[in-house]
Amino acid sequence: MSKTLSRKHFLGLAGASVTAVALAACGGPSTDAGSTSAKALSAEDWSKVKPAPSISFMSSHPGKSRDTEQKLIEAFQAANPDIKVNLITGGSNYEEVAQKFQTSQAGSEVPDVVVASDVWWFRYAVSGAILPINALLKAVNVSSSDYKSGLIADYEYSDQLWAVPYARSTPLFYFNKDHFKAAGVPERAPKTWEEFAEWAPRIKSANASASGYQNAYQYPAIAGYAGWTLQNVLWGQGGGWSKEWEITANSSQSVAAMQWVQDSIVKNGWAGVSSKNAITDLQAGAISATISSSADLAATLKAAKEANMRIDVGFLPGGSAAASQVCPTGGSGLVIASKTSPERQLAAAKFVTFMTNAQSTSTLSAATGYMPVAEAADISAIVAQTPEFQTVVDQLKETRTQDFARTFLPGGDQELAKAATRIMNEKADVQATLTELKGTLEAIYNKDVKPKLKS
Amino acid sequence: MGRLDTSDAQTSRAPVHRPPLSIPKNRRWNRRTRRDAWVFAAFAAPNVLLILLFTYRPLVTNFYYSTLDWTLGAATATNVGLGNYVEFFTSPDASSVLGVTAIFTITTVGGAMILGLLVALALNQRLKGTTFARAVVFAPYVLSGVGVGLVWLFIFDPTYGVLSWILRTVGQASPQWVNDPKLALLMVIIVYVWKNLGYCAVVYLAGLQSVPAQLLEAASLDGASSLRRFTSVVLPLLSPTTFFLLITSLLSSLQAFDIIRIMTPSGNGTSTLIFDSYLQAFGSYNRAGYSAAISVVLFAGLLVMTAVQLRFVERKVHYS
């Protein structure tokens, strides 16, 4: 079958191609200062909107929750037969999801609901990629008071609510009871880091002969949110990365805390830094204790049972300056994209409130170890099945909102990790490193955040 | 030396008998030219348009983005002119990024070429199993960089890795390959050289097999030792191959991404220009304009190397 290309057809094809080129060149940001993001509708406006028949949900399946998320989606579709939810795997962690969501802003199709970690939702809000959801919650008859107050408050900015809590976690102290017993120290989590520093040399020497044994304590991999877990040590000694927008990374307390961290590795030698995943090191028996997210609880206990190993969890240790309120919250919430139609946004609101209601959050908590985010969540069955989960619930009362330097500064977490690498792996001078860190964080704040903050 | 004067050339030759033409010369020429032009356009236009759309348009757009202070995903941006370039070249990170890029490029290119030449010399021997050995040596080059990175990451793992197990059996602790920035760079260099030496070996092998046997025999008769034959006969004859490999390996190393991304996702000690460009835009900074400026710096570097190739190298490379 041969068909000659007529002049008319050729010109048509060429014209279409040139148009495609021209249209494709239209992408990218506007440099017009007057451009604004989409405005949210009021509650009354939403009453006139009919939910879209189909929406998409982009997730990293936090805490290996893909099957659980799919189950919850099926339950949502059964309760809302007119709305279909397409689950999209956006990557294996929050950063990969963020990368895909932000890149999608340049195109015409964006996911309707996205899992956003504690460091990402604020950037989405500032850049206008997500919608404030106060009115939407009202439109689907959900109140912000239905959520744990300490968790929902994390998503307030500029008198608006930008997300609902979903897979919210808190770091826990995981330890190998067999190793502690062998060392003759109490089989519980230490109350303070000073107490653990007394135990640690004994723990290490008692278990050093075991094949592959490394350390009494393993700091989590620096690439995996070092700035998050180190807040515990900093707060315990009265320091911190920042106090709201004031950078305090080089305060005397912060320097003392990070010096203590460096000494535990270099001078005292009972601690190390994981190169990949400290909780896996614990499960392998290579270390005696570590700090990891509560999201690792279910999988860790299961692995320990299979390996006939006694692993337990406890509150994060306090420090010389503060014994309580030294546990940061973490994890992710659900946000709704602003670049979609009101119909899709309303369907998305129905979906996010379903995914975070009392029953759904209990299901997710039981499967993973994330904290229940709804006030009405009944966790008695979960605790009966997994008594260690009570620690997560109890620690929730002791949690503290994270330092702004980590959560709200673009690249802040990366800069904290760089400083931690220098101090913990390269034995750099602590004072000088933290002073340099302060300068870097302040520059980021002044350049990328301060001009965009709404009063 | 100018263009060939066709009228002079024709007059200097013997007269050619031409049949009478039934169509006027101008009309025949125009019709054929027009038809050829249409055929050319029909074949070339789709490719030209695709190249314009997917190569040149992003290139031009990237230049434009490099002049913006633009947060990835934001609908608006501010024009900062050359501000991103000034910031990059005056930042403390620039020297680190350029230094890592230089170390990575020089060691991977040099390592792959030297080891590739040694392997090619071994494979050039008339021994049993060389065909199988050639396939084995070349195989890593065609493997996926992601797969290679994951497997080697396991090998280097200080807790569960094969390397750590071997070291433990001789009473040594494994180095912290990922945590120590210097070791992390060494780790990705080792893996990159391992993956690419097969390519150099195969190209060098082709070069070695084209070395005339008579020259080597003549050198032997003159009493030249093996080393002398290699340095005075083989190596000079391999110079076109060496130049070719130098340029292709340089361009490839400067654009190396997959192995670095998989083995050191946060760029701890391994932030080359291209990886830093990725981290700035798609890591936690989201500085798309700044990232675009870094990629323009990389582009300029590649352009200079290509120009050097065209100016000094192309004439020395023999493709047949």
Image (spheres, rainbow, N blue to C red):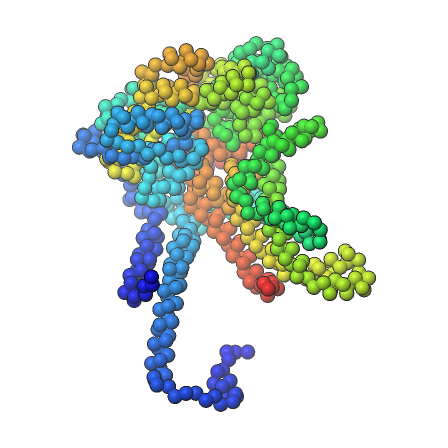
Q: Residue furthest front?
A: A1
Tell how many labels: 0
Q: Is residue A214 left or right of residue A135?
A: right
- Report which quarter residue B242 is drawn in: bottom right
Residue B106 x %, y %:
62, 49
Q: Residue furthest right?
A: B223
Q: Nearer the viewer, residue B130 or B308?
A: B130
Please tell me which residue is depicted at 60% across the width and 19% down the height of the picture. Answer: A216
Please tell me which residue is depicted at 38% across the width and 71% down the height of the picture. Answer: B36
Q: Is residue A54 left or right of residue B217?
A: left
Please tell me which residue is depicted at 45% across the width and 33% down the height of the picture. Answer: A92
Instruction: For residue A182, say whether it is visible.
Output: yes
Q: Is residue A225 left or right of residue A209?
A: left
In the rendered image, the quadrant that contains the N terminus of chain B is: bottom right
Q: Nearer the viewer, residue A28 or B11?
A: B11
A195 w.r.t. A414: above or below: above
Q: Nearer the viewer, residue B270 or B203?
A: B203
- Report which quarter residue A209 is drawn in: top right
Residue A452 x %, y %:
36, 37
Q: Nearer the viewer, residue B246 or A194?
A: B246
Residue A308 x %, y %:
55, 16
Please tell me which residue is depicted at 66% across the width and 61% down the height of the picture. Answer: B210
In the rendered image, the quadrant that contains the C terminus of chain B is: bottom right
Residue B149 x %, y %:
55, 39
A98 w.r.t. B59: above or below: above
